[in-house]
Amino acid sequence: MKGMVLAAAFMSLVILSVVAPSEEAIADQGNYCGKGPVVDLLELELVGGAVNGHGKVCATPQGLRSNMTVDGLAEGFAYTVWWVYIDDTSQCQGPITEPFIEPPGYAGPCGFADFFDFVNEAANPLVVFGRMDSAIPSGDGPTRFSGTVRGMKPSSGSQVWFLVFGHGPAATGDGQQLARQLLTPEDPASGAPHLGIVGGPQAYPSSVVVIDIP
């Protein structure tokens, strides 16, 4: 009888490990995990925060999993983080020097110019992007973000960014505006009015992590 109970307990553990594997187990099965530092874009210039931290992405059989830790984001501000994917970095057009100067070499040959298709009037830009996470920093420690894209399989030679957008003080008294701050880029170029706003951008590129996929 005791042997049957032990066997049943053992089988239960096996079933649990198959049905609900840990995050570490999933990452260990992956094809690649890479890390990168947080690079300031406009957070220091516009808000005064000296950002630092790191991000990590794992390409697993289930897709992409990410986590990111950032120090120096403004307390009470709204922030979103966006997956940015560039499938072939050899096609990159490089950074844009206006309206702000991008840090030299932070994304290798790539940069914000790759969000646009200047030849075909934005019909097929090199960059593909989508929302990863959002937060309103409390000021009591680093801000953490994470995300998952199931089924995604990055190509060899591709690049993954975690792009942080700052949206200013969180509109906690206006539910509709707060939702825009935490769910959209607030940039008309992203697709006004639903994915942005009509008029000029109301958000700014705060900081970024860039990871190359070998």
Image: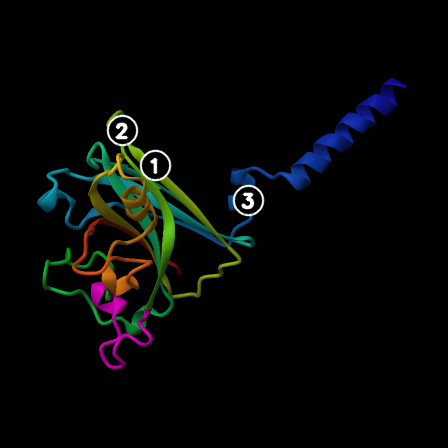
The type of residue carrying mark 2 is Ser
* Residue 138: image location, x then y, percent: 27, 28
Give residue 108's quadrant in the image.
bottom left
Image quadrant containing the C terminus? bottom left
Q: Which residues are magenta?
A: 110-126
Kindly give the residue lying farthest to the bottom in the view shown. 119
Magenta segment includes 115: yes
Closer to the observer: label 1 or label 3? 1
In the rendered structure, are the residues bearing label 3 and label 2 in contact, judged by CB atoms less than 8 Å apart? no
Kindly give the residue lying farthest to the top in the view shown. 2
Separation of marks 1 and 3 at Cα, in angstroms: 20 Å
Instruction: Judge from the rendering whether residue 47 lies leftward or rightward of residue 13; answer left or right.
Output: left
| Circle 3: element type | helix
The type of residue carrying mark 3 is Ile
Which mark identifies residue 138? Answer: 2
Location of mark 1 (residue): 144
Q: Earlier in the sequence, mark 1 or mark 2?
A: 2
Separation of marks 1 and 2 at Cα, in angstroms: 11 Å
